[in-house]
Image: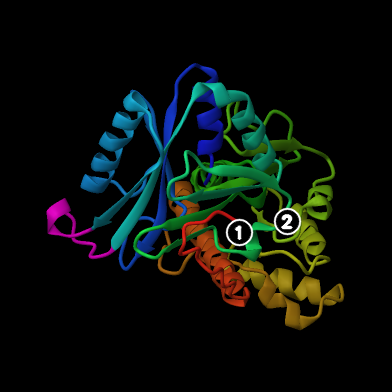
Amino acid sequence: MNDWLHTLANWLEAGQPAVVVTVVRADGSTPREAGATMLVGRASIVDTIGGGHLEWLASTTARELLVDGGAPRLMRFALGASLGQCCGGVVWLALERIGVAEADVWRTRAEAVAAGGTLQRRLLSGDEGSLWSLSDADPGRGEPAQFWSDGGHWQFEQQVASERFPVIVFGAGHVGEAIIHALAPLGAQITWVDTRDDIFPAAVPEGVFTVNTDIPTTEIYDAPAGSYFLVLTHDHSLDFSLCEAIFTRHDFAFFGLIGSRTKRASFEHRLIARGLPTERLPDMTCPIGIPGIDSKQPGAIALSVAAQLLQVREARQAVARAARPVAITPFLLSGARP
Protein backbone atom coordinates (compact mmCIF):
# COMPACT_ATOMS: atom_id res chain seq x y z
CA MET A 1 0.00 0.00 0.00
CA ASN A 2 3.10 2.17 -0.24
CA ASP A 3 2.92 3.07 3.46
CA TRP A 4 6.59 2.05 3.45
CA LEU A 5 7.37 5.60 2.37
CA HIS A 6 6.45 7.03 5.77
CA THR A 7 8.24 4.21 7.58
CA LEU A 8 11.38 4.86 5.55
CA ALA A 9 11.25 8.57 6.40
CA ASN A 10 10.78 7.73 10.09
CA TRP A 11 13.74 5.35 10.12
CA LEU A 12 16.04 7.78 8.37
CA GLU A 13 15.06 10.61 10.73
CA ALA A 14 15.88 8.30 13.65
CA GLY A 15 19.35 7.70 12.23
CA GLN A 16 18.62 4.25 10.83
CA PRO A 17 19.54 3.48 7.20
CA ALA A 18 17.37 1.04 5.27
CA VAL A 19 17.39 -1.14 2.20
CA VAL A 20 14.44 -0.92 -0.18
CA VAL A 21 13.73 -4.36 -1.65
CA THR A 22 11.46 -4.19 -4.69
CA VAL A 23 9.98 -6.88 -6.92
CA VAL A 24 10.98 -5.52 -10.32
CA ARG A 25 9.62 -8.40 -12.37
CA ALA A 26 7.40 -11.39 -11.62
CA ASP A 27 6.86 -14.15 -14.21
CA GLY A 28 4.42 -16.99 -13.74
CA SER A 29 3.06 -17.89 -10.32
CA THR A 30 4.67 -15.66 -7.69
CA PRO A 31 3.68 -14.61 -4.15
CA ARG A 32 3.83 -10.85 -4.89
CA GLU A 33 3.43 -8.63 -7.92
CA ALA A 34 5.94 -6.35 -9.65
CA GLY A 35 6.25 -3.16 -7.64
CA ALA A 36 5.75 -4.84 -4.25
CA THR A 37 8.23 -3.31 -1.81
CA MET A 38 9.75 -4.33 1.52
CA LEU A 39 11.96 -2.31 3.86
CA VAL A 40 14.83 -3.98 5.68
CA GLY A 41 16.52 -2.29 8.62
CA ARG A 42 19.13 -3.43 11.11
CA ALA A 43 16.56 -5.12 13.34
CA SER A 44 13.21 -4.69 11.58
CA ILE A 45 11.42 -5.62 8.37
CA VAL A 46 8.34 -3.80 7.13
CA ASP A 47 5.94 -5.24 4.55
CA THR A 48 6.72 -8.33 2.50
CA ILE A 49 7.81 -9.55 -0.91
CA GLY A 50 6.18 -12.92 -0.37
CA GLY A 51 7.69 -14.61 2.66
CA GLY A 52 9.43 -17.97 2.78
CA HIS A 53 13.01 -18.69 1.79
CA LEU A 54 12.85 -16.00 -0.91
CA GLU A 55 12.28 -13.30 1.67
CA TRP A 56 14.88 -14.74 4.03
CA LEU A 57 17.57 -14.65 1.32
CA ALA A 58 16.57 -11.15 0.25
CA SER A 59 16.66 -9.93 3.86
CA THR A 60 20.06 -11.49 4.46
CA THR A 61 21.50 -9.82 1.37
CA ALA A 62 19.83 -6.54 2.33
CA ARG A 63 21.49 -6.56 5.75
CA GLU A 64 24.86 -7.19 4.10
CA LEU A 65 24.20 -4.16 1.93
CA LEU A 66 23.31 -2.14 5.03
CA VAL A 67 26.73 -2.88 6.53
CA ASP A 68 28.95 -2.89 3.45
CA GLY A 69 27.18 -0.29 1.33
CA GLY A 70 27.58 -0.29 -2.41
CA ALA A 71 25.52 0.05 -5.56
CA PRO A 72 22.03 -1.42 -5.96
CA ARG A 73 21.88 -5.14 -6.60
CA LEU A 74 19.66 -7.18 -8.89
CA MET A 75 18.77 -10.73 -7.83
CA ARG A 76 16.88 -13.42 -9.74
CA PHE A 77 15.10 -16.32 -8.05
CA ALA A 78 13.37 -19.34 -9.55
CA LEU A 79 10.68 -20.30 -7.06
CA GLY A 80 11.32 -24.02 -7.16
CA ALA A 81 12.73 -26.81 -5.04
CA SER A 82 16.07 -25.08 -4.46
CA LEU A 83 14.25 -22.38 -2.49
CA GLY A 84 11.89 -24.79 -0.78
CA GLN A 85 9.01 -23.20 -2.69
CA CYS A 86 6.68 -24.61 -5.29
CA CYS A 87 5.17 -21.51 -6.90
CA GLY A 88 6.98 -22.26 -10.14
CA GLY A 89 7.46 -18.64 -11.16
CA VAL A 90 10.50 -16.42 -11.41
CA VAL A 91 11.10 -13.22 -9.42
CA TRP A 92 13.64 -10.44 -9.94
CA LEU A 93 14.45 -8.20 -6.97
CA ALA A 94 16.23 -4.86 -6.79
CA LEU A 95 17.93 -4.00 -3.49
CA GLU A 96 18.96 -0.41 -2.84
CA ARG A 97 20.46 1.14 0.30
CA ILE A 98 19.07 4.48 1.48
CA GLY A 99 21.29 6.51 3.83
CA VAL A 100 20.24 8.74 6.71
CA ALA A 101 21.54 11.85 4.91
CA GLU A 102 18.46 11.63 2.70
CA ALA A 103 15.96 11.85 5.56
CA ASP A 104 14.57 15.26 4.60
CA VAL A 105 14.01 14.44 0.96
CA TRP A 106 12.26 11.17 1.81
CA ARG A 107 9.93 12.95 4.23
CA THR A 108 9.03 15.33 1.40
CA ARG A 109 8.42 12.44 -0.97
CA ALA A 110 6.26 10.55 1.53
CA GLU A 111 4.09 13.59 2.20
CA ALA A 112 3.76 14.37 -1.51
CA VAL A 113 2.54 10.85 -2.32
CA ALA A 114 0.11 10.93 0.61
CA ALA A 115 -1.27 14.18 -0.83
CA GLY A 116 -1.94 12.53 -4.21
CA GLY A 117 1.37 12.93 -6.02
CA THR A 118 3.30 10.23 -7.84
CA LEU A 119 6.90 9.26 -7.11
CA GLN A 120 8.67 8.09 -10.24
CA ARG A 121 11.75 5.91 -10.10
CA ARG A 122 14.30 4.94 -12.73
CA LEU A 123 17.20 2.58 -12.12
CA LEU A 124 19.67 1.37 -14.75
CA SER A 125 22.31 -1.31 -14.39
CA GLY A 126 25.58 0.25 -13.34
CA ASP A 127 23.97 3.27 -11.69
CA GLU A 128 24.94 4.17 -8.13
CA GLY A 129 21.30 4.66 -7.19
CA SER A 130 17.82 5.29 -8.50
CA LEU A 131 16.74 8.56 -10.02
CA TRP A 132 13.63 9.59 -8.04
CA SER A 133 11.32 12.44 -9.06
CA LEU A 134 7.92 13.72 -7.99
CA SER A 135 5.18 14.19 -10.54
CA ASP A 136 1.53 15.16 -10.75
CA ALA A 137 1.00 12.58 -13.50
CA ASP A 138 -1.90 10.18 -13.16
CA PRO A 139 -0.37 6.82 -12.10
CA GLY A 140 -3.26 5.05 -13.84
CA ARG A 141 -1.73 5.86 -17.23
CA GLY A 142 1.08 3.37 -16.88
CA GLU A 143 2.07 0.13 -15.21
CA PRO A 144 3.33 0.54 -11.63
CA ALA A 145 6.56 -1.30 -12.49
CA GLN A 146 8.36 -2.18 -15.72
CA PHE A 147 11.61 -4.04 -16.25
CA TRP A 148 13.67 -4.54 -19.40
CA SER A 149 16.85 -6.50 -19.97
CA ASP A 150 18.95 -7.67 -22.91
CA GLY A 151 20.77 -10.20 -20.77
CA GLY A 152 23.56 -7.80 -19.91
CA HIS A 153 22.15 -4.37 -19.22
CA TRP A 154 18.84 -3.81 -17.50
CA GLN A 155 16.46 -0.96 -16.73
CA PHE A 156 13.71 -0.64 -14.12
CA GLU A 157 11.01 2.02 -13.91
CA GLN A 158 8.42 2.34 -11.17
CA GLN A 159 5.55 4.62 -10.22
CA VAL A 160 4.78 4.89 -6.52
CA ALA A 161 1.41 6.42 -5.68
CA SER A 162 -1.09 6.23 -2.87
CA GLU A 163 -3.15 3.07 -3.20
CA ARG A 164 -5.76 4.11 -0.68
CA PHE A 165 -9.33 4.14 -1.98
CA PRO A 166 -12.08 6.36 -0.54
CA VAL A 167 -14.74 4.66 1.59
CA ILE A 168 -17.48 6.61 3.35
CA VAL A 169 -19.15 4.62 6.13
CA PHE A 170 -22.36 5.95 7.70
CA GLY A 171 -23.02 4.44 11.11
CA ALA A 172 -20.76 3.86 14.12
CA GLY A 173 -22.54 0.91 15.66
CA HIS A 174 -21.06 -2.55 16.20
CA VAL A 175 -21.17 -3.49 12.50
CA GLY A 176 -19.75 -0.14 11.43
CA GLU A 177 -16.86 -0.46 13.84
CA ALA A 178 -16.12 -4.02 12.71
CA ILE A 179 -16.13 -2.91 9.06
CA ILE A 180 -13.74 -0.06 9.86
CA HIS A 181 -11.24 -2.47 11.39
CA ALA A 182 -11.60 -4.91 8.47
CA LEU A 183 -11.10 -2.28 5.76
CA ALA A 184 -8.36 -0.11 7.27
CA PRO A 185 -5.50 -2.64 6.76
CA LEU A 186 -6.57 -3.11 3.13
CA GLY A 187 -5.74 0.41 2.03
CA ALA A 188 -9.08 2.13 2.48
CA GLN A 189 -9.11 5.86 3.22
CA ILE A 190 -12.19 5.86 5.44
CA THR A 191 -14.50 8.69 6.38
CA TRP A 192 -16.61 7.41 9.27
CA VAL A 193 -19.80 9.41 9.78
CA ASP A 194 -22.41 9.45 12.55
CA THR A 195 -24.96 11.94 13.87
CA ARG A 196 -24.70 10.83 17.50
CA ASP A 197 -22.43 12.54 20.01
CA ASP A 198 -19.63 10.59 21.71
CA ILE A 199 -20.25 7.51 19.58
CA PHE A 200 -16.77 6.98 18.15
CA PRO A 201 -14.12 4.99 20.02
CA ALA A 202 -11.19 6.89 21.52
CA ALA A 203 -8.73 5.32 19.06
CA VAL A 204 -9.32 4.51 15.39
CA PRO A 205 -7.04 2.78 12.88
CA GLU A 206 -4.67 4.71 10.64
CA GLY A 207 -6.44 6.07 7.57
CA VAL A 208 -9.77 6.56 9.37
CA PHE A 209 -11.26 10.04 9.86
CA THR A 210 -14.32 10.44 12.08
CA VAL A 211 -17.04 12.97 11.31
CA ASN A 212 -19.76 13.84 13.83
CA THR A 213 -22.38 15.91 12.04
CA ASP A 214 -26.07 16.76 11.96
CA ILE A 215 -25.91 16.92 8.14
CA PRO A 216 -24.34 13.62 7.05
CA THR A 217 -25.46 14.07 3.43
CA THR A 218 -22.75 16.73 3.08
CA GLU A 219 -20.18 13.94 3.17
CA ILE A 220 -21.88 12.38 0.16
CA TYR A 221 -21.77 15.54 -1.92
CA ASP A 222 -18.14 16.22 -0.94
CA ALA A 223 -16.86 12.70 -1.57
CA PRO A 224 -14.45 12.19 -4.49
CA ALA A 225 -15.46 10.37 -7.65
CA GLY A 226 -15.00 6.63 -7.36
CA SER A 227 -15.99 6.52 -3.69
CA TYR A 228 -17.40 3.45 -1.96
CA PHE A 229 -20.49 4.24 0.14
CA LEU A 230 -21.74 2.04 2.97
CA VAL A 231 -24.99 2.95 4.73
CA LEU A 232 -25.61 1.20 8.05
CA THR A 233 -26.96 3.71 10.55
CA HIS A 234 -29.20 3.14 13.58
CA ASP A 235 -32.18 4.85 11.88
CA HIS A 236 -34.07 3.60 8.80
CA SER A 237 -35.31 7.11 8.03
CA LEU A 238 -31.74 8.35 8.01
CA ASP A 239 -30.71 5.38 5.87
CA PHE A 240 -33.34 6.35 3.32
CA SER A 241 -32.25 9.99 3.23
CA LEU A 242 -28.67 8.92 2.66
CA CYS A 243 -29.74 6.57 -0.12
CA GLU A 244 -31.58 9.39 -1.86
CA ALA A 245 -28.51 11.60 -1.64
CA ILE A 246 -26.18 8.89 -2.96
CA PHE A 247 -28.46 8.33 -5.96
CA THR A 248 -27.97 11.99 -6.96
CA ARG A 249 -24.45 10.93 -7.93
CA HIS A 250 -23.49 8.82 -10.93
CA ASP A 251 -19.78 8.45 -10.26
CA PHE A 252 -19.50 6.17 -7.22
CA ALA A 253 -17.70 2.84 -7.33
CA PHE A 254 -20.00 1.05 -4.89
CA PHE A 255 -23.12 1.77 -2.88
CA GLY A 256 -24.10 -0.72 -0.19
CA LEU A 257 -27.04 -0.60 2.21
CA ILE A 258 -27.25 -2.92 5.19
CA GLY A 259 -30.54 -4.76 5.57
CA SER A 260 -32.75 -7.56 4.35
CA ARG A 261 -34.40 -8.11 0.99
CA THR A 262 -37.60 -6.84 2.59
CA LYS A 263 -35.87 -3.57 3.49
CA ARG A 264 -34.55 -3.32 -0.05
CA ALA A 265 -38.00 -3.83 -1.55
CA SER A 266 -39.45 -1.15 0.74
CA PHE A 267 -36.70 1.33 -0.14
CA GLU A 268 -37.03 0.60 -3.86
CA HIS A 269 -40.76 1.31 -3.77
CA ARG A 270 -40.19 4.63 -1.98
CA LEU A 271 -37.32 5.65 -4.25
CA ILE A 272 -39.35 5.02 -7.39
CA ALA A 273 -42.20 7.03 -5.88
CA ARG A 274 -39.69 9.87 -5.43
CA GLY A 275 -38.79 9.74 -9.12
CA LEU A 276 -35.75 7.46 -9.24
CA PRO A 277 -35.54 5.66 -12.63
CA THR A 278 -35.95 1.92 -12.18
CA GLU A 279 -32.83 1.23 -14.20
CA ARG A 280 -30.75 2.78 -11.40
CA LEU A 281 -31.98 0.39 -8.71
CA PRO A 282 -29.22 -2.19 -9.40
CA ASP A 283 -26.68 0.49 -8.43
CA MET A 284 -27.66 -0.17 -4.81
CA THR A 285 -26.33 -3.36 -3.20
CA CYS A 286 -28.63 -4.67 -0.49
CA PRO A 287 -28.12 -6.97 1.36
CA ILE A 288 -24.38 -6.31 1.53
CA GLY A 289 -21.61 -8.90 1.67
CA ILE A 290 -20.51 -11.75 -0.53
CA PRO A 291 -22.95 -14.65 -1.10
CA GLY A 292 -22.70 -17.67 1.16
CA ILE A 293 -21.98 -15.87 4.43
CA ASP A 294 -25.22 -15.64 6.38
CA SER A 295 -23.85 -14.97 9.87
CA LYS A 296 -25.24 -11.90 11.61
CA GLN A 297 -22.17 -11.47 13.79
CA PRO A 298 -20.55 -8.05 13.23
CA GLY A 299 -17.13 -9.57 12.57
CA ALA A 300 -18.50 -11.97 9.97
CA ILE A 301 -20.48 -9.20 8.26
CA ALA A 302 -17.38 -7.02 8.22
CA LEU A 303 -15.20 -9.67 6.58
CA SER A 304 -17.90 -10.36 4.00
CA VAL A 305 -18.31 -6.67 3.15
CA ALA A 306 -14.55 -6.09 2.99
CA ALA A 307 -14.22 -9.00 0.55
CA GLN A 308 -17.05 -7.57 -1.54
CA LEU A 309 -15.41 -4.15 -1.78
CA LEU A 310 -12.09 -5.73 -2.73
CA GLN A 311 -13.82 -7.70 -5.49
CA VAL A 312 -15.31 -4.50 -6.89
CA ARG A 313 -12.05 -2.60 -6.59
CA GLU A 314 -9.95 -5.28 -8.30
CA ALA A 315 -12.51 -5.63 -11.09
CA ARG A 316 -12.37 -1.87 -11.68
CA GLN A 317 -8.57 -1.96 -11.69
CA ALA A 318 -8.55 -4.81 -14.22
CA VAL A 319 -10.87 -2.87 -16.53
CA ALA A 320 -8.67 0.24 -16.19
CA ARG A 321 -5.54 -1.76 -17.02
CA ALA A 322 -7.17 -3.33 -20.06
CA ALA A 323 -8.12 0.12 -21.35
CA ARG A 324 -4.60 1.54 -21.15
CA PRO A 325 -2.63 1.93 -24.37
CA VAL A 326 0.48 -0.22 -24.54
CA ALA A 327 3.60 1.90 -24.33
CA ILE A 328 6.64 0.44 -26.12
CA THR A 329 9.90 1.71 -24.65
CA PRO A 330 13.00 0.59 -26.56
CA PHE A 331 15.76 -0.73 -24.32
CA LEU A 332 19.19 0.85 -24.64
CA LEU A 333 21.22 -2.18 -25.71
CA SER A 334 24.44 -0.21 -25.77
CA GLY A 335 24.07 0.69 -22.13
CA ALA A 336 24.36 4.38 -23.03
CA ARG A 337 22.39 6.81 -20.91
CA PRO A 338 19.88 9.11 -22.60
Going by the image, does 303 lie left or right of 159? left
- Residue 36 among those drawn in magenta: no
Q: Residue at x 63, y 29 (%)?
A: 105
Residue 68, position as x, y percentages in the image: 33, 26
Residue 86, position as x, y percentages in the image: 18, 61
Front-most of residues 261 and 135:
135
**Magenta segment:** 79-89
- Residue 82 among those drawn in magenta: yes
Going by the image, does 148 lie left or right of 84? right
- If you read the primary sequence from the N terminus, does the residue marked by circle 1 or circle 2 appear first? 2
Going by the image, does 80 lie left or right of 144? left
Q: Quadrant of the C terminus?
A: bottom right
Please, what is the three-letter code of the amino acid marked with disc 1? Ile
Q: Residue furthest bottom?
A: 279
Front-most of residues 150 and 305:
150
Residue 100, position as x, y percentages in the image: 51, 22
Going by the image, does 314 lie left or right of 216? left
SS at circle 2? helix
SS at circle 1? loop
Residue of label 2: 239
Please, what is the three-letter code of the amino acid marked with disc 2? Asp
Residue of label 1: 258
Q: Can residue 301 be seen from the camera position used here?
A: yes
Q: Cβ–Cβ below 8 Å for labels 1 and 2?
A: yes
Q: Quadrant of residue 112?
A: top right
Dot 1 surroundings within 10 Å: few (below 14), some, or many (20 or more)? many
Q: What is the magenta segment's predominant secondary structure?
A: loop
Residue 312, position as x, y percentages in the image: 56, 66
Query: How far is the residue under mark 1 from the one under mark 2?
Result: 9 Å
Q: Residue at x 77, y 57 (%)?
A: 242
